[in-house]
Amino acid sequence: MPVPLYQAKAEFFRTLGHPARIRVLELLQDGPLPVRELLAEIDIEASSLSQQLAVLRRTQLVTATRDGNTVVYALSTPDVSELLRTARGILTDMITDQGLLLEQLRADTDAADDDRGADAARPSTDRTLLT
């Protein structure tokens, strides 16, 4: 029985769910790189990088070729770069929206603080009975 498309998409996005994998894909956007250069750019152990590269190979997001003793990785398709650019755009929009919301919250807080300050300066009209 074939996997439903939504499940395949979920698996695909789970593959992208590790920071080291995203960093590898970002680095490979500029062209193929040998493992030693990836390792120099990513702050993880060689064995961890190897595991992450294996996941990316299994899902066919990257390809690996051997040049003598050197293994060189590349993106399997330019669509991966497009996906990363799209994700950056979405995140930028989200952060911008959050920034606008933060500005509104701060403005509301400042206005509320000003109102509280004005209330403190006004004589109280509260008529509480003391018994």
Image (cartoon, rainbow, N blue to C red):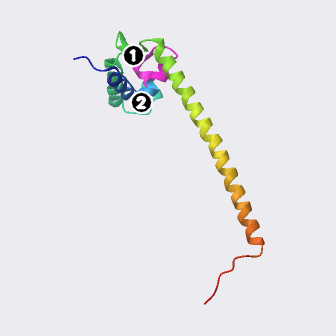
Three-letter amino acid code at the position of disc 2 = Ala
Q: Residue at x 68, y 53 (%)?
A: 108
Q: Is residue 26 magenta?
A: yes
Q: Which residues are magenta?
A: 25-38
Q: Residue at x 37, y 33 (%)?
A: 45
- Amino acid at dot 1: Val
Establish if 124 lies above or below 69: below
The picture places residue 90, in percent across and down from the top left corner, at: 55, 28
Looking at the image, residue 67 lies above or below residue 48: above
- Residue 94 position, x and y percent, is 57, 34
Q: Quadrant of the C terminus?
A: bottom right
Q: CA distance from mark 2 to mark 1?
A: 14 Å
User: Disc 1 designates what residue?
Assistant: 62
Of 79 and 58, the residue lying toward us: 79
Q: What residue is shown at x 44% (from left), y 33% (from top)? A: 43
Nearer to the camera, 1 or 74: 1
Q: Residue at x 46, y 27 (%)?
A: 23
In front of the other: 11 or 56: 11
Residue under label 2, please give it: 20
Q: Point out the tag, 2 or 1, that comes first from the N-terminus.
A: 2
Q: Is residue 45 left or right of residue 100?
A: left
Give the x, y percent position of residue 48: 34, 31
Dot 1: few (<14), some (14–19), or many (≥20) neighbours within 10 Å? Answer: many
- What is the secondary structure assignment of the residue under circle 1? strand
| Farthest-out residue, bottom | 131
Local SS, label 2: helix
Asked if the residue at tag 1 contacts the one at tag 2, i.e. Cβ–Cβ closer than 8 Å, the answer is no
Q: Is residue 117 left or right of residue 78?
A: right
Quarter of the rendering containing residue 59: top left
Depth check, front residue: 66 or 98: 98
* Image coords of residue 7 (percent x, y): 32, 25
